[in-house]
């Protein structure tokens, strides 16, 4: 393979003092030479040169928790309701989407939307079945909350799903949360394999465009996996993808002899995903005490302690890493209990032992939970953008309890390895937005800000550490993958609040330019 010299760059050193480098040499997908600061670039025949025009180079960010293929399909099939400020705006976006897709009365196709947040609606309430009936009474309509843990359906959709829409039925307002969403989601006609492939390819290119060199993608079902496998087989993946299959697929994967780490340079199987609770936005995250703004509930655990522990041990026994969605402090405690109970099984399986137990979100912690995470070697995928979106956290949790919400600095200083992520499509797929909101916190939580150098490492080395990679993975260093991003502005030379506005000029994966602005 041809050597590629990336020159006229500014390559800061994150782990030691010293001058920034100005060039990087890539060969066979890895960094073969790197300017230690002030040395001349190699000159020999056959080297391809890429002029980075003085831009700042950072280690390639990896989104440690997103729903890549689902995001691609959503953008193709569903109206984007994020940021809608009223029911009238939701109606307008849904009607515009119906026009875009040329939906016609009587054609039987569903009208879908995703991303509404009842907290910011002018009406200060949830949309309901009657609202959706007024938008589309003659076709099925389903909209999903921004967190993905709740939805609202109209009467036609409820009928097709075979659930009651009567005032005394299970879904009197058309609202469903958590597992109660299953029949509504199952009733939506499935996309074709070709549509899944197109969605996966679009989303992977979008990840490169916004500054990610890789993602850890939660997989909803095997058709998403097949789409990514087809792209990898044909050499079309522009970024590296680690797939996190659901627990429901464990038996199938185990029967096929697949374990965590199986795959290629661009596509691998990662952890098996479990859920311990729901979301703060839907008040289904399991808390140790009732919600401050709704004392009638403290959320809910998806499984009892024995069942959660049994599932964790089954995952370890099959040779997989485990990752568990846990948001509330009660869910965090239950998850750590299950991981501790399964530790002997993990240590007894050489494949599982290679990978640390990981928690997805770790949204509400306290000192005891942080210490347990550290002592058990638990790692966490965190989402900086949540801190801004969930501005209502002090009201929902109470001011004192909210100090432990999205407590990234507390976790980092407490010795818990972190990987940065977006949870797209819950939040925008945007590397600099996520990085920027880690180094600049909202007013309700200023003490949890992370220094820039640490934030950059959390999104690069940290995300690799979550997937059990050897030390050094994700760094800009000789021998490591030539995965990096060149920025239009230097993040060290702008106010912290402006880091999220920096544009991505070039994304390089394996020494190949995958995005060029």
Image (tube, grey):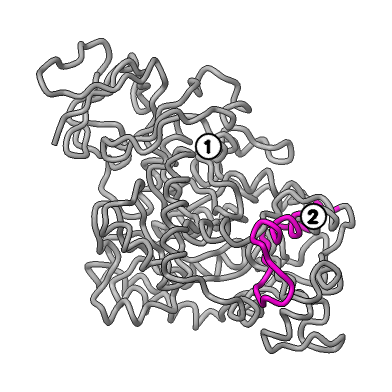
User: Residue at left 69%, top 37%?
Assistant: 442
Q: What secondary structure is found at the residue carrying circle 2? A: helix
Give the number of callouts. 2
Outermost residue toward the left in this view: 45
Crowding near the residue tagged with mark 2, few <14, some 14–19, many ≥20 C-alpha atoms within 10 Å: some
Residue carrying label 1: 435
Coordinates of residue 496 in the picture (x, y in percent): 59, 26
Evaluate whether residue 279 shows in this view.
Answer: yes
Q: In the rendered view, does 174 fall on the left or right side of 273?
A: right
Q: What secondary structure is found at the residue carrying circle 1? A: helix
User: In what quadrant of the picture does the N terminus appear?
Assistant: top left
Q: Range of the magenta residues? A: 93-121
Q: In the rendered view, does 195 fall on the left or right side of 389?
A: left
Residue 449 lies in what quarter of the image? top right
Residue 329 lies in what quarter of the image? bottom right
**C-alpha gap between disc 1 and disc 2:** 32 Å
Residue carrying label 2: 92
Is residue 219 located in the magenta-colored stretch of the structure?
Answer: no
Is residue 111 located in the magenta-colored stretch of the structure?
Answer: yes
Using the image, determine if residue 181 lies above or below residue 507. Answer: below
Coordinates of residue 471 in the picture (x, y in percent): 27, 44
User: Residue at left 82%, top 77%?
Assistant: 173
User: Residue at left 28%, top 72%?
Assistant: 319
Coordinates of residue 346 in the picture (x, y in percent): 31, 70
Using the image, determine if residue 306 lies above or below residue 365. Answer: below
Closer to us: 312 or 278: 278
Evaluate whether residue 295 shows in this view.
Answer: no
User: In what quadrant of the picture does the C terminus appear?
Assistant: top left
């Amino acid at each position: 393979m041809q050597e590629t010299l990336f020159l006229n760059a500014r390559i800061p050193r994150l782990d030691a003092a010293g001058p920034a480098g100005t060039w990087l040499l890539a060969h066979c997908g890895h960094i073969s030479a790197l300017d230690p600061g002030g040395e001349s670039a190699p000159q020999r025949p056959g080297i391809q040169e890429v002029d980075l025009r003085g831009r700042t180079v950072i280690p390639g960010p990896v989104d440690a928790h997103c729903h890549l293929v689902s995001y691609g399909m959503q953008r193709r099939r569903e109206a984007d309701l994020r940021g809608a400020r009223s029911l009238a705006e939701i109606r307008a976006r849904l009607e515009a989407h119906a026009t875009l897709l040329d939906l016609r009365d009587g054609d039987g196709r569903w009208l879908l939307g995703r991303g509404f947040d009842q907290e910011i609606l002018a009406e200060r309430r949830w949309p309901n079945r009657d609202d959706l009936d007024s938008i589309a009474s003659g076709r099925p309509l389903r909209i999903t909350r921004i967190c993905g843990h709740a939805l609202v359906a109209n009467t036609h959709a409820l009928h097709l799903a075979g659930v009651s829409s009567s005032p005394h039925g299970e879904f009197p307002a058309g609202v469903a949360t958590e597992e109660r969403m299953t029949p509504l989601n199952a009733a939506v006609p499935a996309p074709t394999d070709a549509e899944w492939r197109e969605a996966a390819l679009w989303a992977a290119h979008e990840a490169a465009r916004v500054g990610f060199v890789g993602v850890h993608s939660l997989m909803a079902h095997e058709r998403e996996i097949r789409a990514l496998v087809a792209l990898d087989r044909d050499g079309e993946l522009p970024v590296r993808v680690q797939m996190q299959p659901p627990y429901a697929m464990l038996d199938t994967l185990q029967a096929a002899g697949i374990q965590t780490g199986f795959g290629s340079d661009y596509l691998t199987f990662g952890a098996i995903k479990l859920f311990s609770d729901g979301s703060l936005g839907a008040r289904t995250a399991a808390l140790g005490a009732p919600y401050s703004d709704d004392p009638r509930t403290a959320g809910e655990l998806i499984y009892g302690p024995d069942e959660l522990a049994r599932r964790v041990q089954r995952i370890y026994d099959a040779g997989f890493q485990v990752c568990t969605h846990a948001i509330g402090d009660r869910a965090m405690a239950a998850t750590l209990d299950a991981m501790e109970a399964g530790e002997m099984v993990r240590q007894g399986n050489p494949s599982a032992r290679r990978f640390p137990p990981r928690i997805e979100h770790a949204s509400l912690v306290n000192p005891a939970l942080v210490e347990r995470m550290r002592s058990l070697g638990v790692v966490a995928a965190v989402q900086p953008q949540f801190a801004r979106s969930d501005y209502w956290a002090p009201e929902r949790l109470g001011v004192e309890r909210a100090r432990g919400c999205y407590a990234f600095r507390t976790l980092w200083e407490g010795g818990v390895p972190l990987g940065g992520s977006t949870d797209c499509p819950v939040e925008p797929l945007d590397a600099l937005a996520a990085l920027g909101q880690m180094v600049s916190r909202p007013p309700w939580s200023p003490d949890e800000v992370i220094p820039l150098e640490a934030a950059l490492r959390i999104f690069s080395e940290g995300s690799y550490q979550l997937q059990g990679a050897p030390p050094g993975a994700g760094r800009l260093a000789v021998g490591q993958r030539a995965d990096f991003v060149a920025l239009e502005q230097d993040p060290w030379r702008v106010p912290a609040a402006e880091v999220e506005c920096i544009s991505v000029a070039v994304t390089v994966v394996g020494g190949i330019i995958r995005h060029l602005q």
